[in-house]
Image: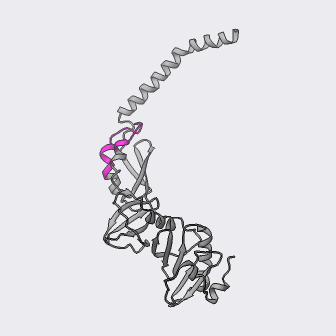
Amino acid sequence: MSGEGGRSRWTWRWLPALLLAAALVAGLVFWLSQSSLLAIEEIEVEGTIVVPDEEVVAATAPYLLGRSLVSLSYDEAAAALADRPFIESVSFDRRPPHTICIRVRERRPVLVFNDVSGRYFIVSDEGFVIASRQGPDPDLPLLTVAGACAVEAGAPTDCGELLTGVAFVADIPAEFNHRFTEVSVAGEDIRAVTAGGTRVVFGSLEQYQLKFEVLRQLLARTAQPGVKTTIDVSVPERPVTRQGEPEPATKGEAHATTTAAGAAGTVE
């Protein structure tokens, strides 16, 4: 009992001092938030690739310059960038005495989608339709789908075939050092063309990592300049390689005949 009573007396004895200290800290923070002592004079930008730094500074400067670094929120400045489709999110890093850094997280474009009406859209790795454009992008694969996909720039898509195409190109293993120029999706069936002109029958997204490893090995063995090659890894345990013009075939037919290169290829 005496112990509890002692603690109680100690608490009541120091409570006024603790409340006074808290009030002083709150008053100091409020004073700093209104003072020019830590006023923002310079805006730095980090993380941008597509969006110009100058554009970020121009949009946020009216909400940041002259404001104190100890402000609890910069929501207005963040909102000023919300309509930039390439910007996914921003955060603010205070750098006393007079600098604030805006850290920008941009959306990562992974493909250009060509819809049935002939329009082109840049799509991110999360299925966000970043923007429309006049035509293909030489740095991104061009995706076509069998069905109709209604998309809108500045909004996520829920089109299944489009999202399948995004999933196919968004997480390609780093060791797969080939680039795709074209991708087509029909239902769950994925086909693609590499920058070297090799046609790929990938099938569904199942066994994704294994299929890419088989494909990587077969590309290293069979790719020949000027020779049209088709590699079918839809059944990765029994890959198929053909040379010459591609022939339309079902999965069963595709595995009925193989070239010597395809039959000899085994997964290492």
**In-front residue for pair 187/211:** 187
Residue 171 in the image: state x and y as whole percent.
Answer: 53, 65
The residue at 62%/73% (across/down) is 213
Q: Which stretch is magenta? A: 58-76
The residue at 59%/71% (across/down) is 175
**In-front residue for pair 222/38:** 222
Say if 227 sits above or below 180 in the image: below
In the picture provided, is 48 more to the left or to the right than 238? left
User: Can residue 190 be seen in the rendering of this structure?
Assistant: yes
Residue 228 in the image: state x and y as whole percent.
Answer: 51, 88
- Magenta region includes residue 187: no
Q: Quadrant of residue 217?
A: bottom right
**In-front residue for pair 42/158:** 158
User: Can residue 102 be seen in the rendering of this structure?
Assistant: no
**In-front residue for pair 44/257:** 257
In the picture provided, is 202 more to the left or to the right than 53? right
- Magenta region includes residue 68: yes
Say if 83 sits above or below 24 in the image: below
Q: Quadrant of residue 10?
A: top right
Give the number of callouts: 0
The residue at 38%/58% (across/down) is 86
Residue 267 in the image: state x and y as whole percent.
Answer: 67, 76
**Looking at the figure, which quarter contains the N terminus?**
top right
Give the colouring mode of the picture.
one colour
**Looking at the figure, which quarter contains the C terminus?**
bottom right
Say if 2 sits above or below 196 in the image: above
In the picture provided, is 252 more to the left or to the right than 38? right
Residue 36 in the image: state x and y as whole percent.
Answer: 35, 36
